[in-house]
Image (cartoon, rainbow, N blue to C red):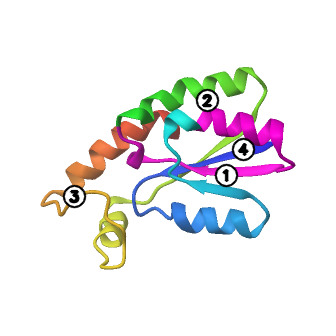
Amino acid sequence: MKLVIVTGMSGAGKTIALKMLEDIGFYCVDNLPISLVDKFVQLVSEGTNIEKTALGLDIRSGEELGNLDEILENWRSSNVDVQVLFLDANDAVLIKRIKRPAAPILLQAQEDWKAVLKKEREKLAFLKK
């Protein structure tokens, strides 16, 4: 099974990327709790005929997000065909997208969006690496 982790900054286009992957035959799941990710991949790879899966994982996972690093290492050592697609944009573009009325804002209205984005970048750094 091919597995793609779609991740990145808020407003960088993860939802659109997942929709595009779905259009080309990937089974896509967005915002699955990190505690279920490993079990989900195990079930899909052993109990279905699904060949391509994409998981949308990002800052919404909260404190559990840090656990993903160990899970990724375990998959890689187990020869799971996993790739990380990290989406990003410059701060001005992200702020513009996050502030759109139709955008699902993850964080309540902030006065200092650059500081918010800096914290998000720090939390996601291991995935970008």
Q: Residue at x 87, y 49 (%)?
A: 49
* Mark closer to the chain start, 3 or 1: 1
Which percent across, then down, holds residue 92?
A: 31, 66
Q: Residue furthest bottom?
A: 101
34 falls in the magenta region: no
Please state the extent of the stretch shown in magenta in the rendering. 37-62
| Crowd around label 4: few <14 · some 14–19 · many ≥20 (10 Å) | many
Q: Amino acid at mark 4?
A: Leu
Q: Which residue is mark 3?
A: 113
1 sits to left or right of 123: right
Nearer to the camera, 128 or 5: 5
85 sits to left or right of 12: right
Which percent across, then down, holds residue 97?
A: 36, 71
* Mark closer to the chain start, 2 or 4: 4
Secondary structure at numbered mark 4: strand
Which percent across, then down, holds residue 13?
A: 50, 65
Q: Amino acid at mark 2?
A: Leu
What is the CA distance from the residue labelled 4 to the residue labelled 3?
32 Å
What is the CA distance from the residue labelled 4 to the residue labelled 1?
6 Å
Quadrant containing the N terminus is: top right
* Mark closer to the chain start, 2 or 3: 2
Q: Are marks 4 and 1 in contact (CB under 8 Å)?
A: yes
